[in-house]
Image (spheres, coloured by chain):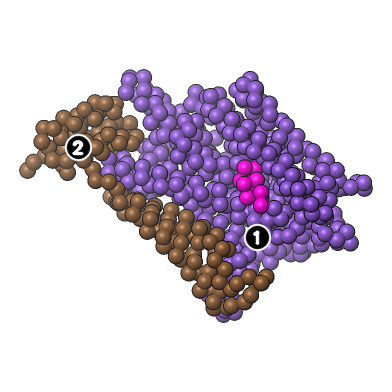
Amino acid sequence: MTEQAIEQHHRLERDILAAMSRPTGWYWVALGVSIAAFLMGMGLWLYMILTGMGVAGINNPVGWGVFIVDFVFWVGIAHSGTLISAVLFLFRARFRSRFNRAAEAMTIFAVMTAGLFPLIHLGRVWFAYWLFPYPNNHLIWPNFKSPLVWDVFAVSTYLTVSAVFWYVGLIPDLAIARRHAKNKIQMWAYRVFSLGWVGSVQQWKHYNKLYGLLACFATPLVVSVHSVVSWDFAMSVIPGWHTTIFAPYFVAGAILSGCAMVITLMVPMRKIFRLEEIITVKHFEGIAQMLLLTSLIVTYSYIVEYAIAFYSGNTYEISHFVYRLLGAEEPGHYRYAYWVMVACNSVIPLLLFFRKVRTSIPALFVMSLFVNVGMWLERFIIIVTSLARDFDPYAWGLYKPSFVEVGITIGSFGLFFTLFLLFCKTLPVLAITEIKEEYT
Amino acid sequence: MQEYRFEDEHSYLHKLQELVDSGVPTRKIHAFSPIPVPAAEQILREKPTFVRVFAIAGALMGMLAGFALCIYTVLRYPMIVSGKPVVAVLPFVVIAFELTILLGSLATFAGFLLNARLPYIPRIFNPDEYGTHFTILVEEDR
């Protein structure tokens, strides 16, 4: 290790931990707006609880609306965190160390946000514990053949395992933060949560094994979670849902949306905390390539979905997919949603084939916003259009989100950004130890 | 207690090797580093970690618990749902899989804490700080 590397180690600690220094005015503004949005969402939820589910736009036949769209959207966002931390760890991708901490934090906050939506959608939220298997005086148990119960297990496992994985990654960094603590509360918090870590040879030995094993557990988990979410739909017989491609299609989409959200969060963070020297354009290029790859897989899935529908020869499937593509004559039929989605998820990311776009941070940021919108629309199209037009024309109907649903959606963004902003100021935003390893 | 501090990994490893070669028993050498240094494990002839045993035990327990939970509960209230057999293994695989991962990860984490002796309460109150230094402590003969 050279003099230069030693100097770099000191600089890294200083620069990364500097992000945790006293927040500026803009931070408070951002936090205030996020909390206000979250409180508005909670207020609307309370209104819905007191008034009844009628204030949501969901109806018969469209019984799953924006709440379920948001649930799938946020679970999807969560996926890239574990992908970046676990899968890329196993593949030894170098650019991962710049994103893994923030991406894992994003995962946990996104799963927490996602977890709210089934509760909101339940209506009688105070019976939420019925979803879990527990001995009760009715002597009944959840139906383990139902994908909705699988979902409970998958999402709660995902939240627990990604929280453990995140915390394990944090332990050596908390020990570093412990040395740089500015006040008593901080010092004690870091002391307690770093568990008395000193970095002895024995500790590192067990630690490295643990990290590798957790990555091995998390990798199949990340694939399973969105597969299970997709089976919430694919296990039913609704045209547009009942297809075998759903699991890989959803997983690819989840990673696409997650990578986009990582870019959306990391670009401003890098700028505000002046981490340009640590997170370079080269690292962003790595994640942009992943965005391009997953976008191509998603595009392929869009095509295959149509191929499956038409090849099946099933009238309902075919007419449903024609409806998705063209809409109906009358207005209000989600006619443009599909094309906006294709533009956002399939066409715009093609620009990433150009190196100039891949290495331009503003271009990546704008593109990530488009993909976020596109992926939300994808879930909307899958869930809502399928329900709006199933088998019997007599049972067809339309759905429009009500202000309560829109408000709660905005509130979920508020919650997510609130948690992320708090994370930025309380924990090391980059994996200091891992980046140090690269500099030796 | 003799203490050696180094700024960099190479002199640290060099000193470790020197100490081991000069006949200091490895149990008397305590080495600390700000980043993982796998070569130090080899020099100190560390035994492989037991953490993986916890992983396998936890994963197996999770799988069995998943199947047991599903099968036990359907047999307690045997109701035919959508014409499927009461004990339907295929859907139960999903639950068993999730619990395999859940208990496997938690057991691995618990195994790590046990093996690495964490949380170590005295050090929480009074942390030994070696900063960015690579440090070797050698117990002296009494």
Query: Subunit of mark 1?
Result: A
Q: Position of residue B42 (x, y in %)?
A: 24, 37
Q: CA distance from mark 1 to mark 2?
A: 55 Å
Dot 2: within a 10 Å radius of its alpha carbon, few (fewer than 14), some, or many (20 or more) residues? some
Q: Which residue is mark 2?
A: B137
Give the extent of the magenta segment: A244-254
Q: Residue at x 78, y 38 (%)?
A: A340
Q: Which chain is brown?
A: B
Instruction: Please say whether residue A412 is visible from this viewpoint.
Output: no
Residue A172 image label: none
Tell me: residue B35, above or below residue A43. above
The residue shown at (65%, 35%) is: A296
Among the 4 quarters of the image, the one containing residue A191: top left
Q: Position of residue A43 (x, y in %)?
A: 71, 55
- Residue A291 located left or right of residue B8: right
Say which of A404 and A150 sits in front. A150
Q: Which chain is purple?
A: A
Q: From the image, tell me which residue sits under label 1.
A: A119
Please tell me if label 1 and label 2 are on a single chain.
no
Helix, strand or loop: magenta stretch: helix
The picture places residue B140, in percent across and down from the top left corner, at 11, 39
Which one is nearer the viewer's eye here, A192 or B103? B103
Point out the residue furthest to the right here.
Answer: A330
Seen at 39% across and 26% down, the residue is: A439
